[in-house]
Amino acid sequence: MPPIGVMGGTFDPIHFGHLRLAEDMADALGLDRVLFIPAGQPPHRGTPHTQASHRLEMVRRAIAGNPRFTADAREVQRPQPSYTVDTLTALRAERGVGQPLWLLLGADAFLGLPGWHDWRRLFDLANIAVATRSGAQLMQPDAIMEPLKSEVMQRQVAGKNQANRPAGSVLLRATPPLDISATAIRGMLARHDSARYLLPDAVLDYIHEHQLYVHT
C-alpha cells in the first residue's frame, strides 16, 4: 500500500514553509497523501495565539486544490493535550500494521524529540522524515543529543526505494531553505505590515476577514 505522510503543528498560521516541506517530502517518498493535523492543545509550547477552529480552517484553505493534501481535525477535536504518539497510535489502529506512515518534521522539531512525550515509541509507530539543509551537519556531535543520535544511526534509509516500510526508518533530506516563520508573520500582521507571498492568499484573506493576530 502507498505510504502516507503526517504533518503536525500549531499552524499559527500555516505558511509556504510548511507547504513546501510537505510537497518536497511527498515527492521524495512517493507519498499517496499528506495529512495536515493542527494541534489542539500542544504540550510542547505555549498556548497558540489563535483558536483551533481558525487554525484548522486556515489549513483547509491553504491546501485546497492539492489532491495529495488532506486536513485532519482529530487533534483539534480531542479534549486532551495533542501528543503526537497518541495521534500516530490512532492512525496505526485505523490503517493497520502494514500501512507505511511517515512523520514529517523540520530539523528543529526533530532535534527536540527527546523532550516529547514517549518519544521512542514514535519510531515503532512511524518512519520519520526530517527536512534539513544538510543531513550530514545535523548528525554532528554538537548538533544532536546522544539518545536521539543512537536511534537515528540504527535507522537511516537512503530514500524513495525504501519508503514502503511501515515504521522504524529515518530519512534526513536536504530541502530548499524557505526561511519563513509563523512568529515573524504574526509580528508583521500585528504591525500591519504586508505578509503577502509568505503564505497563501486564501489564508491571508481569512486572517484579515477575522482580524487574527492584530494584537499579537
Image: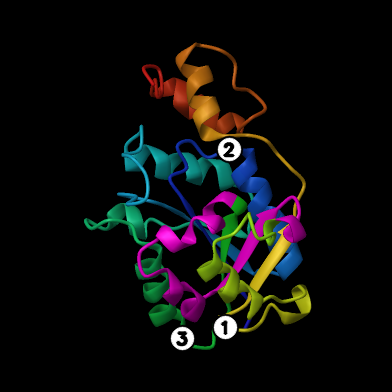
Disc 2: which residue: 15
Q: Position of residue 80 (x, y in %)?
A: 23, 58
Q: Residue 70 — which label?
A: none
**CA gap, disc 1 to disc 3?**
9 Å
**Lower sequence index among marks 1 and 3:** 3
Q: Residue at x 67, y 35 (%)?
A: 179
Which amino acid, mark 3?
Answer: Gly
Front position in the image: 56 or 137: 137
Please check the rendered image and state whether residue 126 is part of the magenta-colored stretch, yes or no: yes
- Residue at disc 2, secondary structure: loop
Q: Which residue of the protein is positioned furthest toward the front in this rendering?
A: 142
Residue to which mark 1 is pinned: 166
Q: In which quarter of the image is the C terminus?
A: top left
Q: Mark 2 and mark 3: span between their CA atoms?
A: 32 Å
Q: What element carries label 1?
A: loop
Q: Does the magenta stretch include residue 30?
A: no
What residue sits 53% from the left and 18% below the top? Answer: 188
Q: Name the residue under label 3.
A: 96
The amino acid pointed to by label 1 is: Pro
Left or right: 211 as drawn, with respect to 168: left
- On screen, residue 131 versus residue 7, left or right, reads right
Q: How is the image coloured?
A: rainbow
Q: Which of marks 1 and 2 is nearer the N terminus?
A: 2
For residue 176, above or below residue 68: above
Name the residue located 57 percent from the left edge and 34 percent from the top edge: 181
The stretch in magenta equals 108-137
